[in-house]
Image (spheres, rainbow, N blue to C red):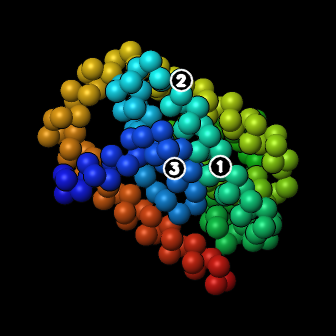
Amino acid sequence: MRAFFFSLLSYFLSPLGVVFMGVLDASMVFFLPLGIDFVVIIMAARKPDWFWVYALLATLGSIIGAAGTFWIGRKAGEKGLARFVGARRLKRVTSRVNRGAFVVAAMGLIPPPFPFTPFVLASGALGMNPWSFLGALAVVRTLRFGVESALAAEYGRGILAWMKTPTFQMIVGAFIGIAVIGTIVSAVMLVRSRKM
């Protein structure tokens, strides 16, 4: 398991990997709580002088992934939104989306397990201006990833030392299990929603 984890992790620990993880993190199917945050922190801890680059790359990937989710919401429309978002949550999501692009984008600061994807879908489905939404989200995500990477650049030695402990490896193993289960559940729900 350890060898598998480190081989998988090594792919994401590159500049292109940061962008790809950002895209996956903002998509409707992939599920890995704090995945993009984790990658940004490790990259900034390894190369502190480049912390700002990793924040921008993570933001770029996040915006690309959110744009895809937004587009799916736009195609689904208001009526199709109920296929992706449960009825109980839909009313709350809709009321927040109606407050405007910056309010929804500001929720992008909140780390998981806050479910941000329903808000992105609803923003597209309810006809929010894509440039306003994605622009506001870019500002918010740059702030979030910038703070994370700056802190990692400052305290990186401690982070890298902690990564070598058995506790860290157990935590990561648990996150991999959650990611696999969450991704399977998300994919099944997406397929079922398309059949409805």
- Residue at the extreme left of the image, as rendered: 166
Q: The residue under label 3 is which amino acid type?
A: Phe
Q: The residue under label 2 is which amino acid type?
A: Trp
Q: Position of residue 40 (x, y in %)?
A: 44, 34
Q: Which residue is mark 1?
A: 64
Q: Which residue is mark 3?
A: 20
Q: The residue under label 1 is which amino acid type?
A: Ile
- Reply above or below: 163 against 78: above
- Reply above or below: 10 against 88: above
Q: Earlier in the sequence, mark 3 or mark 1?
A: 3
Q: Earlier in the sequence, mark 1 or mark 2?
A: 2
31 relative position to 57: left or right: left
* Residue at x-position 65% and y-position 79%: 194
Q: Position of residue 14 (x, y in %)?
A: 42, 40
Q: Earlier in the sequence, mark 2 or mark 3?
A: 3
Tell me if I can see residue 34 in this picture: no
Q: Quadrant of the C terminus?
A: bottom right
* Residue at x-position 85% and y-position 55%: 127
